[in-house]
Amino acid sequence: QVQLKESGGGLVQAGESLRLSCVASERLYSSYIMGWFRQPPGKEREFVAAIRQGTGRTYYADSVKGRFTISRDRTENTATLQMDNLQPEDTAIYYCTGGSSYPPQATWGQGTQVTVSS
């Protein structure tokens, strides 16, 4: 079974950027979808973004459109989430996810903390 591992979280100030990376433990097939969910403090997990391995089609939550960009590198089995103009409400644990259906929730990484101070 595919395993996913995130990296790149941290503490930033409002308006700054962070890049999260996720690497899969094995080569991913074309129909696989990689994505990101997040869980803000005291709230439930929510979808952030996803990308199809084969076509590169992307999906975004309305709250991050225009600020976050998801991309993938099929040769490296990685997905990257570029987060720009971060705001305090983006503070959350971010999870890399994967699966064969959208939104991808079959496999989860361990999560990485992103904290945005005002």
Image (cartoon, rainbow, N blue to C red):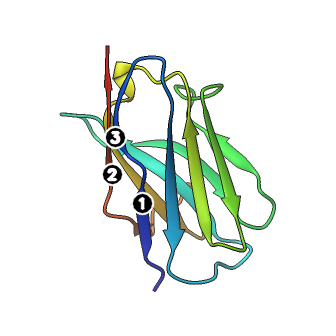
Residue 30 is left or right of residue 117, and the answer is right
The reply to whether residue 86 is visible in this rendering is: yes
Image coordinates for residue 67, horizontal then vertical, percent: 60, 27
**How much space separates mark 3 and mark 1, taking CA atoms?**
12 Å
Q: Considering the numbered disc 2 on the image, is that residue within a helix, a strand or a loop?
A: strand
Which amino acid, mark 2?
Thr
Which amino acid, mark 1?
Glu
Residue indicated by mark 3:
10
**How much space separates mark 2 and mark 3, taking CA atoms?**
8 Å
Furthest toward the left, the residue is: 42
Which amino acid, mark 3?
Gly
Looking at the figure, which quarter contains the C terminus? top left
Counting the numbered discs, the total is: 3
Q: Nearer the viewer, residue 41 or 118?
A: 118
User: Which residue is drawn at the image coordinates 71% and 65% (left, top)?
Assistant: 53
Image coordinates for residue 5, horizontal then vertical, percent: 41, 67
Q: Determine whether label 2 and label 1 are within 8 Å by CB.
A: yes
Residue indicated by mark 1:
6
Residue 31 is left or right of residue 22, and the answer is right
Residue indicated by mark 2:
112
